[in-house]
Amino acid sequence: MDFTSPIQMVDLLSQHQKIQMELDSAVLKVAHSGSYVNGPEVKIFTEGLKTFLGVEHVIPCANGTDALQIALMSLGLKSGDEVITAAFTYIATAEVISLLGLKAVLVDVEPDYFGLDIDQVESAITSKTKAIIPVHLYGQAANMERLNSIALKYELEIIEDSAQSMGAKYNFSDGRTEMLGTIGTIGCTSFFPSKNLGCMGDGGALFTNDRVLAERIKMISNHGQKIKYQHDVIGCNSRLDTIQAAILSVKLNYLEEYNSSRQRAAYFYDQGLGNLSTLQIPKRRKDSSHVYHQYTLRVLDGSRDSLAKFLNDKGIPSMIYYPFPLHFQKAFKSDQYPIGSLPVSEKLSSQVLSLPMHSELDEQIQVYIVETIKKFYEV
Ligand SMILES: *Cc1c(COP(=O)(O)O)cnc(C)c1O
């Protein structure tokens, strides 16, 4: 099949071109204002995001990894305190725990939904455990209802890694619905260009409903100062650029539309691939919407790598998020987690394959991708 341009995992340029005039004028306005750091656009964007999320406080920062780091710093943990997180996630989630001298305690995930396995979280809790970082991987929630009750029972803080789940909602059994990222003590997100809400460089933010924590977070992200040149705590320098904030204000208006496009594309893949016995299409939780940061298959018969190669030969990109669980990384290797100790994460790393997914995915391209996958399995 011949398409005018190569198929892409993520097509940022097409998304850009549709609203280019709006974005250009937002960027130029900042360029011509001379106000490049903490300009008025930063406040405008954070106010917009507050309204969108229904959260009391949004504190912007330089990227999603910083958001996670600042969140941990704001909780005032001591060296050696333990933070529980998933073994199957992006390195950033756990990296910041170790970087701060805290102990990353890795637990397995649910094989069907890729979120924290809550039974294992509970078994991993010790007297040193202070916080849990659930990751809403690929755009769908971890089991927040159960996690909340465990956090209450053991008096632990929850930091949500919402880098992949902007705009997704969680439904509690009492009928309440809340945006992911606003449920835990602190939520963290990233505005990396390929995320569901992405800017033209790096960006991130923290969310909280706790006023005192919000003040602390602001202070930490600004060199530990509330008043200029009075540094109360050790902080860091982590800001969202004015120009990125201006871009994000424009894109926030389209986030729901972008997420709906992703959901449409996901259902299209589902229809085409749902009855192949070798593939498990993404399963949906009843308690969460799914915003498909990734559309990730599980290839159940060991053919993942040869399928990826076949697709690549036919001009179809695919990606493995993530090829190794964290305890297989040199940086995290320890006797505590030998091979076989986190079996679900290990298995998922050998099974997952993410297909092209973005807000501008063309149906013709999806037909071609589905047909090519079927051809590989000769169905
Ligand atoms: C992207 C991402 C991050 C880090 O965000 P950056 O802005 O790249 O620092 C953290 N956690 C997860 C799950 C991510 O996908």
Image (tube, rainbow, N blue to C red):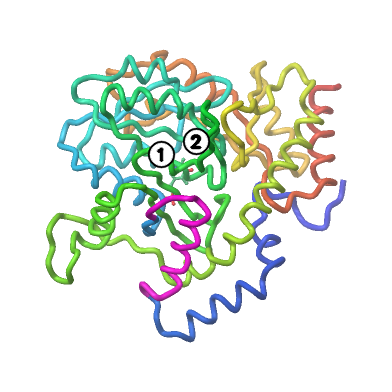
Q: How far apart are the two marked residues, 1 and 2, measured between alpha carbons?
A: 8 Å
Where does label 2 land, which residue? 136
Report the magenta residues as a range.
37-57
Amino acid under label 1? Glu
Mark 2 C-beta to ligand 1 under 8 Å: yes
Q: Are marks 1 and 2 in contact (CB under 8 Å)?
A: yes
Amino acid under label 2? His
256 or 189: nearer the viewer = 256
- Residue 263 higher or lower than 57, as above or below: above
In the rendered structure, find residue 291 and report the number of the disc placed on it: none
59 or 301: nearer the viewer = 59
Q: Is residue 54 magenta?
A: yes
Prevalent SS, magenta region: helix
Identity of the residue drawn at 39% across and 81% down: 35
Identity of the residue drawn at 19% across and 31% down: 81
337 left or right of 79 in image: right
Where does label 1 land, which residue? 160
Q: Secondary structure at mark 1?
A: strand
33 left or right of 284 in image: left
Q: Secondary structure at mark 2?
A: loop
Residue occupying the far front of the picture: 174
Q: Is residue 176 magenta?
A: no
Q: Position of residue 95 (x, y in %)?
A: 33, 39
